[in-house]
């Protein structure tokens, strides 16, 4: 029987272990599309899966990886046929259903997006859930009427932040990048950031419910006190997208930005976003993200290094995007 390689997370006596194993088609989950996975990527959630924090994985053994991009091998779904290039983000891949850290996956066709023209499987995986979240955040800003002006991006050197800066700068916004890693200033300015803000100025507990109005919108990947401070300094009628919780899930703030300045807080969900939203976001990513800047964000690892890199991403020490070449 033909086998393929995959990272498999097992649990014994409450402890998780991630190893590269040889699996067969009998180990695949149910679904109507089988994909030859070419690339996955490492996201914050993959760090949660590998470490076991928050009980992220719901059954064991599990193949982690909330993203995958590859070529359809076989399909009983009328929307897809062998040879189609596809990408998957979310839908609890790597949580309740085997994910992308494998050379093969079987999934529901309703979860897949056909790649827009001009976008390769490598590029789609490099974008991944982080880049998808960044694009959804940009769409939320546009929907909220933030069409120009200054936009703040927190967690700027991470995956979501890197892609968000590149897209926003290309669209003509003046981007402010908040980071705790001063060594990344040149990298962030290369992506298009016009100004660097020390995250320490935003991460402490808010002293006042409202501060001076500074930015028209923001893409926040951090949550908690940082998000409260971002909201407190958003201009009248501005929009802030919330797509991460690196500092925490709490929101220890005030109603003042909402009822005195008409600020909108837009939640970003990458797991269950409707298909029409996904297709729109991927079409925009194909047109609004500079391929050269994307390539400059990417480092590549093989399956054997994916688990260790996921832990580093969780700690916030990785710049940009980490691509997993499942055939390395």
Image (tube, helix red, strand yellow):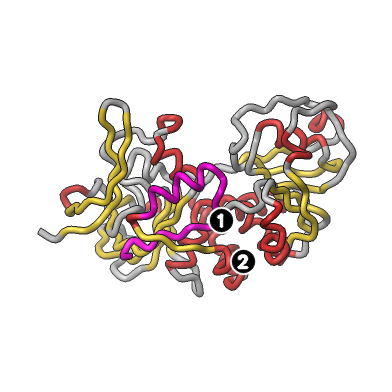
Left or right? Give the position of 293 relative to 93: right
Q: From the viewer's side, name the closer residue of 284 and 2.
A: 2
Counting residues from the start of the chain, the first of labels 2 and 1 encountered is: 1
**Residue placed furthest toward the left:** 1
**Residue at the spot x=59%, y=37% of the render?**
245
**Residue at the spot x=62%, y=35% of the render?**
247
Q: Are marks 2 and 1 in contact (CB under 8 Å)?
A: yes
**Residue at the spot x=60%, y=31% of the render?**
248
Q: Secondary structure at mark 1?
A: helix
Q: Is residue 272 visible?
A: no
**Residue at the spot x=68%, y=56% of the render?**
183
Quadrant (top left, top right, bottom left, bottom right) of the N terminus: bottom left
Q: Which residue is mark 2?
A: 289
Question: Toward which corner of the image does residue 58 lie, by quadrant?
Answer: top left
Image coords of residue 131 (percent x, y): 56, 56
Assess whether residue 327 is covered by the magenta stretch.
yes
Q: From the viewer's side, name the closer residue of 84 and 25.
A: 25
- The residue segment tinted magenta is 305-328
Q: Which residue is mark 1?
A: 131
Classify 10 Å Cα crowding around label 1: few (below 14), some (14-19), many (20 and above). Answer: many
Left or right? Give the position of 229 relative to 306: right
Q: CA distance from mark 2 to mark 1?
A: 9 Å
Assess whether residue 89 is covered by the magenta stretch.
no
Left or right? Give the position of 215 relative to 46: right
- The numbered mark at residue 97 is none
Image coords of residue 219 (percent x, y): 69, 47
Position above or below: 141 against 222: below
Image coords of residue 202 (percent x, y): 76, 38
Q: Is residue 205 visible?
A: yes
Left or right? Give the position of 309 relative to 202: left
């Amino acid at each position: 029987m033909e086998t393929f390689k995959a990272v498999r997370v097992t649990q014994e006596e409450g402890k998780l272990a991630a190893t590269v194993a040889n699996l067969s088609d009998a180990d695949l989950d149910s679904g109507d599309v089988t994909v030859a996975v070419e690339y996955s990527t490492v996201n914050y959630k993959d760090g949660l899966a590998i470490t076991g924090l928050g009980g992220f994985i719901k059954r064991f053994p599990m193949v982690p990886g909330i993203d995958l991009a590859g070529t359809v091998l076989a399909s009983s779904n009328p929307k897809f046929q062998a040879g189609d290039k596809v990408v998957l983000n979310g839908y609890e891949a790597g949580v309740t259903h085997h994910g992308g850290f494998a050379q093969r996956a079987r999934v529901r066709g309703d979860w897949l997006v056909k790649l827009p023209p001009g976008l390769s499987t490598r590029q789609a995986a490099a974008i991944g859930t982080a880049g998808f979240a960044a694009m959804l955040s940009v769409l939320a800003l546009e929907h909220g009427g933030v069409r120009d002006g200054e936009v703040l991006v927190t967690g700027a050197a991470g995956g979501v932040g890197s892609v968000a800066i590149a897209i926003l700068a290309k669209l003509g916004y003046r981007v402010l990048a908040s980071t705790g890693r001063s060594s990344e200033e040149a990298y962030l300015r290369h992506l298009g950031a016009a100004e660097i803000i020390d995250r320490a100025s935003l991460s402490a507990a808010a002293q006042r419910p409202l501060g001076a109005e500074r930015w028209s919108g923001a893409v926040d990947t951090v949550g908690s006190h940082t998000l409260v401070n971002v909201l407190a300094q958003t201009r009248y009628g501005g929009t802030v997208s919330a797509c991460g919780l690196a500092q925490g899930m709490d929101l220890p703030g005030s109603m003042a930005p909402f009822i005195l300045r008409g600020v909108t807080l837009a939640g970003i969900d990458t797991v269950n976003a409707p298909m029409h939203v996904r297709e729109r976001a991927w079409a925009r990513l194909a047109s609004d993200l500079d391929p050269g800047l994307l390539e400059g964000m990417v480092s590549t690892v093989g399956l054997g290094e994916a688990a260790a890199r996921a832990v580093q991403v969780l700690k916030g020490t990785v710049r940009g995007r980490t691509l997993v070449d499942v055939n390395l």
